[in-house]
Amino acid sequence: MNSAITFDAERHEYRDEAGNLVPSVTQIIRAAGLSDPRWYNDRARLRGTAVHTAIQYVNEGTLDESSVMPEIDAYVRAYRRFIQQSGFIIQAFEFRVYNKAHGYAGTMDLLGTLNNKTTVIDIKTGSVPVWTGLQLAAYAACIHCVHQRFALHLTEDSVYRLVRFDDKSDFAVFAGACAVAKWKAAHNVPSEKHEGEQT
C-alpha cells in the first residue's frame, strides 16, 4: 500500500500527502473519452463490487461461505479455479498505487508471479474493454519490473479466462490521456455526458 496516497472508499477519492485530489486511472481514461459509460449500469457496478469484496476475503483467507450470495458464488468459484490451475502466486491484492510524475492513483487488483514473471492482473466480471490495456499499463508504471499484464475475466458460469495485453504503446497512450484530462480540468471542459449517466 502506498503511504503517499490515501483513499476514501465512500467518495471514491484519492488524495496525496498534501490533501490534494488525485484522479484515478479509470477517471482519467473516462475523462479523455476513451471509455463509454453507456456500457455500465448500477447492477453491473454492484456485482463487480461484491465480487471484488468476496475475492479480497478469499485472498485473506477470511471468507464466510454462508455470506456469499448465489449470484456471486459462480464468480468466486471461477477465481478459485484460476488460482488452483494457473499457479499464480499472489504478492499483493487491492494494492494502492500512485504515480507522482503523471499525477494519478489507482487500486490494483492483483500483483504476483505467473510462470515466474511479475504480473499485474485486473479482475473483470463484465466485458473486457480494450482500454483495460491502458489501465494495466498505468498500474504497471507504478511498479518496477512488471513483465506481464492480464485481465482475469470471470463469468456467471464459473469460467475464467486470461486476456493478455502486450501493446508496448499502451502507457504512452495513457500518458496522453493524462494530459488530455488535465487540460480539460484546467479549462473547465466537461466530459461528454450520455443519457442516463449519473454525475
Image (cartoon, rainbow, N blue to C red):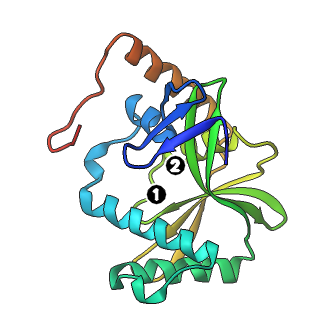
- Few, some or many residues within 10 Å of mark 2 (<14, 14–19, 20+): many
Residue indicated by mark 1: 128
Q: In the figure, residue 110 lies in which quadrant?
A: bottom right
Q: With respect to residue 174, does 69 lie above or below? A: below
The picture places residue 62, in percent across and down from the top left corner, at 58, 79
Kind of residue indicated by mark 2: Thr
Residue indicated by mark 2: 132
Considering depth in this image, is 20 or 53 the residue closer to the camera?
20
The picture places residue 93, in percent across and down from the top left corner, at 64, 60
122 relative to 71 in the view: left or right: right
**Pointers 1 and 2 in contact (CB under 8 A)?**
yes
Considering depth in this image, is 87 or 163 the residue closer to the camera?
87
Considering depth in this image, is 180 or 106 the residue closer to the camera?
106
Q: In the figure, residue 44 lies in which quadrant?
A: bottom left
Q: CA distance from mark 1 to mark 2?
A: 7 Å
Q: Quadrant of the C terminus?
A: top left
User: Which residue is depicted at the point 47% across and 88% down?
Assistant: 65
The picture places residue 87, in percent across and down from the top left corner, at 75, 76
Considering depth in this image, is 194 or 164 the residue closer to the camera?
194
Kind of residue indicated by mark 1: Val
Task: Assign a secondary structure to mark 1.
Answer: loop
- Few, some or many residues within 10 Å of mark 1 (<14, 14–19, 20+): some
123 relative to 199 in the view: left or right: right
